[in-house]
Image (cartoon, rainbow, N blue to C red):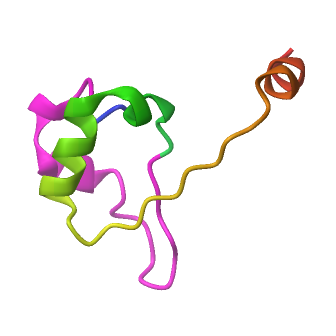
Amino acid sequence: MHYFDRNYERGIDWYRSRFVDARPEELIFDATPSYMYRPEATKRMAHDLPGARILISLRNPIDRAYSQY
């Protein structure tokens, strides 16, 4: 989605509208790897979603490249 780094100007309502179909018992997430190395993204997440839990999954880069191929 790249909300917190590329689409922040669209506003938090735009971001939340991406998850309107989720049921209350479902876990929802935004999988945008570039958030990890964009300082403005992490600051924006902390400000807009203070209670969010962040999960980062790292892979061996060679295994990831092979898998993508």
Is residue 46 among what the camera can see?
yes
| 69 relative to 3 in the view: left or right | right
- Which SS does the magenta portion mostly show? loop
Quarter holding residue 5:
top left
48, above or below 68, in the image: below
| 44 relative to 31 in the view: left or right | left
Q: Nearer the viewer, residue 65 or 3?
A: 65
Q: Does the magenta stretch include residue 22?
A: yes
The percent coordinates of residue 25 (x first, y second) are 49, 85
Give the residue at the far top of this rendering: 69
Q: For the N terminus, which image quadrant?
A: top left
The magenta region covers: 4-30
The percent coordinates of residue 43 (x first, y second) are 18, 43
Q: Is residue 56 magenta?
A: no
Is residue 4 among what the camera can see?
no
Q: Which residue is drawn at 38% across and 35% down?
A: 35
